């Protein structure tokens, strides 16, 4: 089990209402550090790579980040049990978000795209 730290992906639109974060090569039972994103109204997650197991995406309203729950997509479906590449818009507003890998996951990259009109 490793700790996976998200890195910010730089783009020409940085800090103008758009930010992108990447967790690279997530494997089974890795501990993914969260991204603080409560100020962004639009949140989308992409995941692709070698699954071999299930991936989920969690959020927390708690600044301390001690309690997380599985987030849902725009249709109200849980963003969990994903075993192949996917993209989902996150329905809830959360202060912190992070991907979670279950047993069998080989190397999945997760991207979080944050957008705001501010």
Image (spheres, rainbow, N blue to C red):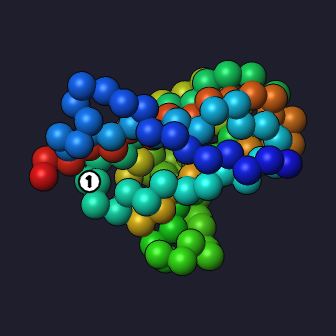
Instruction: Examine the rendered structure and indicate whether residue 36 appears above or below residue 22.
Output: below
Q: Secondary structure at mark 1?
A: loop
Number of callouts: 1
82 horizontally vs 9: left or right? right
How far across and down, in percent of the image, does residue 30 sit?
77, 47
The residue under the point 74% across, 22% down is 50
Instruction: Examine the rendered structure and indicate whether residue 104 appears above or below residue 76.
Output: above
How far across and down, in percent of the image, does residue 25 sit?
70, 31
Would residue 12 be visible to someone looking at this image? yes
65 horizontally vs 17: left or right? right
Q: Nearer the viewer, residue 113 or 19?
A: 19
Q: Nearer the viewer, residue 91 or 45?
A: 45
The residue under the point 56% across, 72% down is 65
Would residue 45 be visible to someone looking at this image? no
Instruction: Examine the rendered structure and indicate whether residue 18 appears above or below residue 106.
Output: below
Q: Which residue is mark 1?
A: 41
Instruction: Examine the rendered structure and indicate whether residue 19 appears above or below residue 33.
Output: above
């Amino acid at each position: 089990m490793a700790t996976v730290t998200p890195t910010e992906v730089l783009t020409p639109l940085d800090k103008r209402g758009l930010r992108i974060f990447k967790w690279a090569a997530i494997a089974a039972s890795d501990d993914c550090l969260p991204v603080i994103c409560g100020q962004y109204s639009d949140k989308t997650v992409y995941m692709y790579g070698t699954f071999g197991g299930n991936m989920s995406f969690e959020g927390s309203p708690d600044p301390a980040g001690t309690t997380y729950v599985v987030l849902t997509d725009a249709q109200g479906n849980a963003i969990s049990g994903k075993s192949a590449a996917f993209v989902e818009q996150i329905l809830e507003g959360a202060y912190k978000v992070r991907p979670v890998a279950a047993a069998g996951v080989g190397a999945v990259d997760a991207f979080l795209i944050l957008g705001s009109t501010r």
